[in-house]
């Protein structure tokens, strides 16, 4: 399958090729023709499946081939990082062609954004709160929007953004195309789709709620007080890989980052108490390899699009099984194999069981007696910790 077969013109097809996209991913194969046709679409796909290009490529084509004034594409995303990343992808795919865009997120100067909006962007990418600020200040005109993209809609619901989005929907033309992307499909998402979309086609690339298949998953039962020691042990088993560590709270992200740094790991952290510029610096450092380890909380991690994250380590088991799917979706991106490790204390076994129920797959346990790993859980012993990391190093 090649990009031009999907209805994309030669310029965009060659651009994909030069970015190393040898063939469209499954979501791109299914979604691009639908988006090009102008129909509504629900894309049930996680981050890492190529979903961003699935909606950006056809939109770039439409903007370039039928020039019109006004904001034509509005993308709403849950976090600043994701919004920024979408604009980076847009400009990377459009590659110097005149697709004017702007990202409107909190934490950045509203004055500069107002100035940017005066330059007539065709594409606006925004988080819900800042978009509403602009609507209320009348600094943005949404009356000519042709396509609305709700990216990571499930996460926006979890974060309580639905009233904001509803408000924005009321400001958009009724005649429009709506594309909704979500890693998981819940009855609530289906309800939203029914009342705000027109005969949407559902495109699923992995069964609902299933984790990405390119991610190998392991769980390490561990005594609560031994988690940090086990994490250090795992991190020291392989020095080259790029590791994303998740914690449940900002405080533990902060503490853990200091502990790792004291052990001379190259580490930074990203969570809601960090300023926008601190978050951007942390992401850049991670992307460019200055920090091998990034410690993140769930919400702050949403826009992390860094290739070659070799390991995701869940220092805490996420309470919501969907968060587990989101977290491990940060590794194993676009055809790379990744590994997800979860440290499970006895009180977290229940949450782990809920995750296994949702992903439909038991997660292999690794028992390390030194870290209290044999005292509980009925799972049979398997690999050793070092083997897990070394296996990757040899590939
Ligand atoms: P996304 O799911 O949009 O977050 O995309 C995940 C990653 O896959 C991004 O780093 C993209 O650059 C990359 N990507 C998108 N489409 C393709 C493709 N057809 N082939 C290879 N990589 C891709």
Image (cartoon, rainbow, N blue to C red):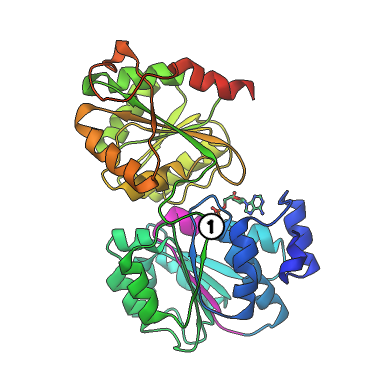
| Residue 186 appears left or right of 33 | left
At horizontal 28% and vertical 16% (from top left) the residue drawn is 374
State which quarter of the image contains the C terminus. top right
Residue 194, position as x, y percentages in the image:
38, 78
Where residue 87 appears, as percent x and y from the top left, is 56, 60
Residue annotated with mark 1: 205
Q: Position of residue 198 (x, y in %)?
A: 46, 83
Relative to the observer, which residue lies in front, 269 or 327?
A: 327
Residue 390 spot, x, y in % from top left: 55, 18
Q: Nearer the viewer, residue 150 or 343?
A: 343
Q: Per the image, is 73 magenta?
A: yes
Q: Does residue 8 sit above or below 256 in this rendering?
A: below
Q: Quadrant of residue 368?
A: top left
Quadrant in which the N terminus appears? bottom right
Which residue is drawn at the image coordinates 39% and 46% (left, top)?
Answer: 359
For label 1, count other residues whose C-alpha is less than 10 Å away and answer few (under 14), some (14-19) or many (20+): many
Residue 53 shows up from this direction:
no
Residue occupying the point 64% across, 55% down: 25
Region of the chain picked out in magenta, as a range: 69-84
36 in magenta: no
Work out which residue is located at the far top of the displayed protein and give it. 370
Task: Identify the residue at image location x=43%, y=49%.
Answer: 210
Query: Considering depth in this image, is 137 or 324 the residue closer to the camera?
Result: 324
Q: Is mark 1 within 8 Å of ligand 1?
A: no
| Residue 130 visible, this angle | yes
């Amino acid at each position: 399958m090649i990009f031009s077969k999907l209805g994309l013109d030669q310029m965009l097809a060659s651009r994909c090729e030069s970015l190393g996209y040898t063939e469209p991913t499954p979501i791109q194969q299914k979604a691009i023709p639908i988006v090009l046709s102008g129909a509504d679409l629900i894309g049930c796909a996680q981050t890492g499946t190529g979903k961003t290009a699935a909606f950006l490529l056809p939109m770039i084509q439409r903007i370039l081939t039928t020039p019109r004034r006004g904001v034509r594409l509005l993308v709403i995303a849950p976090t600043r990082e994701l919004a920024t990343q979408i604009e980076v992808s847009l400009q990377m795919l459009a590659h110097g062609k005149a697709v004017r865009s702007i990202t409107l997120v909190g934490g950045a100067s509203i004055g500069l954004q107002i100035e940017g909006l005066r330059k007539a962007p065709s594409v606006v990418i925004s988080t819900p709160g800042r978009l509403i600020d602009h609507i209320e200040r009348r600094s943005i005109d949404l009356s000519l929007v042709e396509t609305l993209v709700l990216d990571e809609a499930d996460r926006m619901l979890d974060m309580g953004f639905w009233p904001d989005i509803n408000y924005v929907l009321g400001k958009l033309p009724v005649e429009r195309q709506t594309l909704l992307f979500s890693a998981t499909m819940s009855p609530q998402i289906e309800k939203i789709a029914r009342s705000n979309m027109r005969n949407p086609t559902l495109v699923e690339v992995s069964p609902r709620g299933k984790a990405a298949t390119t991610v190998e998953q392991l769980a390490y039962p561990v005594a609560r007080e031994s988690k940090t020691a086990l994490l250090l042990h795992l991190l020291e088993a392989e020095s080259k890989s790029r590791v994303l560590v998740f914690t449940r709270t900002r405080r533990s992200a902060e503490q853990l980052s200091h502990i790792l740094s004291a052990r001379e790991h190259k580490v930074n952290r990203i969570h809601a108490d960090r300023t926008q510029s601190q978050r951007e610096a942390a992401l850049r450092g991670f992307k460019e390899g200055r920090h091998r380890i990034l410690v993140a909380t769930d919400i702050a991690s949403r826009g992390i699009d860094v290739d070659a994250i070799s390991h995701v380590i869940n220092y805490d088991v996420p309470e919501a099984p969907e968060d587990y799917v989101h977290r491990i979706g940060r590794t194993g991106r676009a055809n790379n194999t990744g590994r997800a490790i979860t440290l499970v204390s006895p009180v977290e076994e229940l949450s782990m069981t809920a995750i296994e129920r949702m992903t439909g797959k038991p997660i292999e346990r690794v028992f390390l007696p030194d870290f209290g790993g044999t005292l509980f859980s009925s799972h049979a012993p398997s690999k050793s910790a070092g083997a897990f990391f070394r296996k990757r190093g040899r590939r």
